[in-house]
């Protein structure tokens, strides 16, 4: 992987927690992840490099003031977004 403005250290740190399953990760050359949460708020952020060498940011945030966030459902939606990104022309 070529050096980037953020540096190889930053790219390495984003791989500590993969944030998705192995099958989805295998669709990419690189998957970096950073998530965050607090009651009623969930954020899942991905930096991915597709097999064709193109880089994409896939970002999702869910916020509710009336109830908790459905973490499992949101993770499924974000995995679907990653799969779609991997297959985009």
Image (cartoon, rainbow, N blue to C red):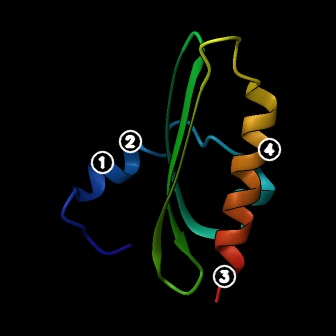
Q: CA distance from mark 3 to mark 4?
A: 18 Å
**Residue situated in front as seen by the camera: 33 or 85:** 85
Q: Earlier in the sequence, mark 3 or mark 1?
A: 1
Q: Which mark is residue 13?
A: 2
Q: Residue at x 28, y 49 (%)?
A: 9
Q: CA distance from mark 3 to mark 2?
A: 26 Å
Image: 3 above or below 17: below
Check disc 3 and report the residue beneath it.
88
Q: CA distance from mark 3 to mark 1?
A: 26 Å
Check disc 1 and report the residue beneath it.
10
Position of the C terminus, as image quadrant, is: bottom right
Q: Residues within 10 Å of mark 3 (few under 14, many from 20)?
A: few
Task: Give percent across and percent down for residue 73.
Answer: 81, 35
Cβ atoms under marks 2 and 1 closer than 8 Å: yes
**Secondary structure of residue under mark 4:** helix
Q: Residue at x 79, y 44 (%)?
A: 76
Cβ atoms under marks 3 and 4 closer than 8 Å: no
Q: CA distance from mark 4 to mark 2?
A: 23 Å
**Secondary structure of residue under mark 3:** loop
Q: Residues within 10 Å of mark 1 (few under 14, many from 20)?
A: few
Check disc 4 and report the residue beneath it.
76
**Residue situated in front as seen by the camera: 86 or 15:** 86
Q: From the viewer's perspective, is the residue at label 3 or at label 2 nearer? A: 3
Image: 46 above or below 38: below
């Amino acid at each position: 992987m070529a050096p980037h403005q953020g540096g190889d250290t930053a790219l390495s740190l984003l791989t500590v927690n993969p944030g998705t399953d192995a099958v989805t990760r295998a669709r990419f050359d690189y998957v970096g992840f950073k998530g965050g949460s607090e009651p009623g708020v969930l954020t899942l952020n991905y930096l991915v490099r597709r097999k064709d060498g193109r880089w994409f940011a896939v970002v999702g945030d869910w916020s509710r003031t009336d109830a908790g966030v459905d973490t499992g459902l949101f993770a499924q939606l974000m995995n679907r977004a990653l799969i779609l990104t991997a297959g985009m022309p």
